[in-house]
Each structure stands twice: as structure tokens, then as C-alpha cells.
Image (cartoon, rainbow, N blue to C red):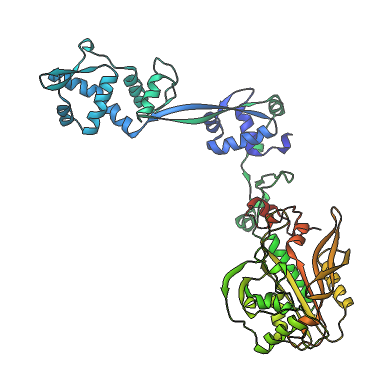
Amino acid sequence: MKEELTASEKRVLLALGEGEVCDQRSLSEKTGVNEDAVMQTAFFLAQKRLCEVQEEKKEFCRLTAEGREYAEKGLPERRALEFLRAKKGATVEELKAAFDEQEAKIAIIWLLKKRWARFEKRGAARFLVPTEVLEGLPLGADEELLEIVAKGGESEEGGERGEGGEAERVVSAEERELVSRNLLETYSRVERKVVATEAGREVLSQGISAEEVEEEVAQLTPEHLRTGSWRTVRFKRYDVNLPSKEVFPAKVHPYQRILDRMRRIFTEMGFAEIKGEIVQSAFWNFDALFVPQDHPAREMQDTFYLGARQPTDAPEELVKNVKEMHEHGGSLNSAGWGGAWRRELGEELLLRTHTTAVTLKYLADHPEPPVKVFCIDRVYRRETIDATHIPEFDQLEGIVLDEGVTFCNLLGCLSAFYKKMGFPEVRFRPGYFPYTEPSVEVEVFVAERGWLELGGAGIFREEVTNPVGVKHPVLAWGLGVGRLAMIQLGLTDIRDLYQPDIDWLRRARVRARV
């Protein structure tokens, strides 16, 4: 055990001797080390059970600035009493003239409260006169306490008095009174005493030489290397098993890292990222995707409408093609939706409910193959907020336009993506979406939770691609980002992705888990 101690620890043990109790000051004087450093060493010894640190919290009081003034001049009521005795009574106005107005008010309150004076009517005037029985009135207990705290020393109430206008707190009526008058203020101080334990005394009995307590060097410096003194100095021992201080370096938000990883995967697969406006017209968000104008998803309970309209930002030929597709299927062997398509409904502005509006716009501007693009961005829907639903969330959208691409290419592309994201088991179930046919729902297997659905995919219907001039198959998908992030970050509530929880952010793993 002795060999494991540092020089400073051995020095403190020697100062404690065989059972001597030392306070901070005496221990500092014996070792020649400042009080803070010597107590830090004592705490290290206490961790090794070689000494015991006894703590006692003591309450003290000291004079305020006003208290110091009154300790020198006397309390206002004492000085006012002398004034009244000399004049055999005085009016309130005379008191205010002789003293500061605020001080005169204080004096009158305490003269009456202590019964040192009373009011007496003399003709039409009221005089404040001293109480007769108070001739030669000695100092009160509060005045004595004020004087003792100012000078230091001891009082009859007991309790050690300190130097420099402070005293160990005496819980008495006088003290409480002076505190309430803002003449005294109280504070606490922890006093520590250190004593060697039986194990510490046993280490001392083994003997500690002067060489063992020589100054230790904590850090190797260039000077040590230049002069060669590193060969002779004594270096401080380090315990590599001690827990280190936690450090929280800056890092990218866990959710942002997942978004960046998705971008990197699709970019590596040959895709280009595209962006679009958050505010879209109902034409691009619904009509161009062959969503009927009476579809429930277009109603207010599902969509954030902005209460404004704007002429459709699409070529008139495209608007005409979409109108005909809705009404009777255009030039295709399709019945459309029937009824009259209304342009004004397509001009309504809304917060996009999916990023498919962005990819379809891009497709209309680039109708010739090959096209491989994706979009990761925010979408908005009127969702009831709970553990798995929020009205604002991210969606991963993508399309592939090329000659001869098939449904198998779509499944292969999505399987490759999810495997790169850490989900080796992927399966597809038949699904339904208004603008794709055939359609599937994508599911991944998670050991603790089983199969989880993470998005939808399919091949754009001709009713979508024909009006924008696309003549080849288009593979399309829309994947949920938030739910995937919850799985990889071990969350059960999607709202936790957006909470400013600094503790969670500090402890979140740099590498997401599956």
C-alpha cells in the first residue's frame, strides 16, 4: 500500500501522525501546502481508507454596511433617546430636522417598540418624550451583540467569535432582530478535520523516509529532456484504472447522421439529389399524380391548405392532358375518374403532403431516359400527434426512368438500400397507392420487434406518366425516414428525434444500431 501512495499523500499522513486530529489550517501549516491542495490530498487518502475527513457545517453572521455604520455611531433609537432626554421631549418634525428623515422614522418605530419613549400631548402639539423609568438605560442585548460582532471576542450567549466583524451564529431573538433590520447577514462555512484511520496508522508504522516525500513531477517538460534532468527527478505515479472525466465532443446530430447516410447510399448507387418548394399547388401534389379531386386525402383534415390560390405553373398542354386523363382517360385505354375536372381546385396552395410532387415536376422537365433522382425532405400532414405520428416529418422519395426497367429492378434497388442501412432481411407485401400499379409495402425485420413497415413503392401508372410525356416505365418509392431512425437509435417515441435533450444528444451513439 505504501508504494502506491504519492509523495503528497505520504506527506499528509506524516503530518497526521499517530491519531492526531488536524483541521485544514493546521494541516496546511505542517505540510507547507495551501489549504485547497492539502484537502484534495486528504480526500484521495480518504478514498483509500487511510484517513477520515470529518465535516461540520457552521453558521456565521457578519455586519452589513448599515450594521457597520450603526456599530460605530450607535443605533438610531439610542441616539434619538439621548436627543429626547436633552430636550425633555421633541416633536416628530424636530426629530426629522435633527436626524436624516429615513433614520428618524426608524428611530421612532424602535423607540416605541422598545418602550423607550411615548407620545404626549402638549396643547395642540404631540411630543415624543422618553420613558421616565429609563434613566441611565444600559446597552440592550441587541446593541451588545452588534458591538461584539464588530470587535470580535466572546459574549454571554456563548459561541466563538471570529476576527474582522464576523461571529459564529447565535440563534437568539436579538440576532433574528438584527438580521430582520438588515444589520447582520448570515452565511455558512464547512469546517473539516482530518484524522488517520487504523489502516493509515499501519502504513505510518512501516516507516516513510525523507526521500519518499520529495517533490514529484507531474508532467515531463522540454526542459527535462534538454537538460537530462528527467533521469533524476521523481515522477508522480498515475493510476490508469481510475475513471476519467467524461468528455462530450461536438458531433453531428444522430438523426442528421442517418439522413446523411441515406444520401451517401443513393449517391453511391448513381442517383442525383433534387430539391423542391415546400408550398405546392394541388395540381402537382394531387392532380398530376392522378389523385381524384374528391379523394379523402385532399380534404382539410389531411392537408394543410394555405387559403390562397395561384395560377398553375405548368404548360397549358400538360394541364389539358391531366384534365382529360381525369375525365375520361385521355388517349389511354382508361376510363379516368369521370365527372368534370375543376381547374380552380388544382390552383389551391398547400404544404406538400409528399415529395412526389417534386420528383414528378422533375420528371416533366426531363422526360427522356435515363433518370435516377432522389429527394429527402420535409412533408406535412394533419396527423394526431402520438408516439409514431407527427404533422411534420421527413420522407425519402426516389424514381428511376429507363428503358426496359421492371418491377424486379425496383425490389432489387430497395433491397440494396435497406441492406446498406443495416437491415439484411427485407420483404415486400402487395399494397395500393393511387398513382402506382403494381404497388408494394416495404418491410424490414428487427429482432426485438419483428417485421416493420417502412414505406411504399411501385411503378407509376400510365395515367401519371402519359400526360407529362414519359413513354418508358418509372420506378418510384416513398420511404419513411423517422420510423427507420427510431429503430436505429433505439427510440420508442418519434417526438424524441426533435426534443432538445442535451443529455440524450451527448450520450447518443455515433454509430446507429439495428
Q: Residue at x 40, y 19 (%)?
A: 173
Please state the horizontal and vertical placement of residue 375, each as a whole percent of the image. Answer: 71, 74
| Quarter-of-image position of residue 355 | bottom right
Q: Nearer the viewer, residue 380 or 101?
A: 380
Residue at image coords 33%, 23%? 147
Q: Position of residue 138 (x, y in %)?
A: 27, 14
Compared with residue 187, is residue 343 higher up or lower down, i.e. above or below? below
The picture quadrant where one finds residue 174 is: top left
Query: Residue at the location (87% across, 74% down)?
Result: 412
Q: Quadrant of the N terminus?
A: top right
Q: Is residue 210 visible?
A: no
- Vertical placement of residue 503 versus 193, above or below: below
486 left or right, relative to 151? right
Query: Could you say where residue 399 lies in the image, as x and y percent from the top left?
Result: 77, 78
Q: Inspect this view and state whether residue 441 appears.
A: yes
Seen from this angle, which residue lies furthest top? 133
Quadrant containing the C terminus is: bottom right
Q: Position of residue 177 (x, y in %)?
A: 37, 23
Number of numbered discs visible in the structure rendering: 0
Residue drawn where x is 69% and y is 44% of the image = 237
461 horizontally vs 183: left or right:
right
Give whichever of 355, 412 is nearer the camera: 355
**Image quarter for residue 483?**
bottom right
Front one among 348 and 241: 348
| Residue placed most toward the observer, 469 or 197 | 469
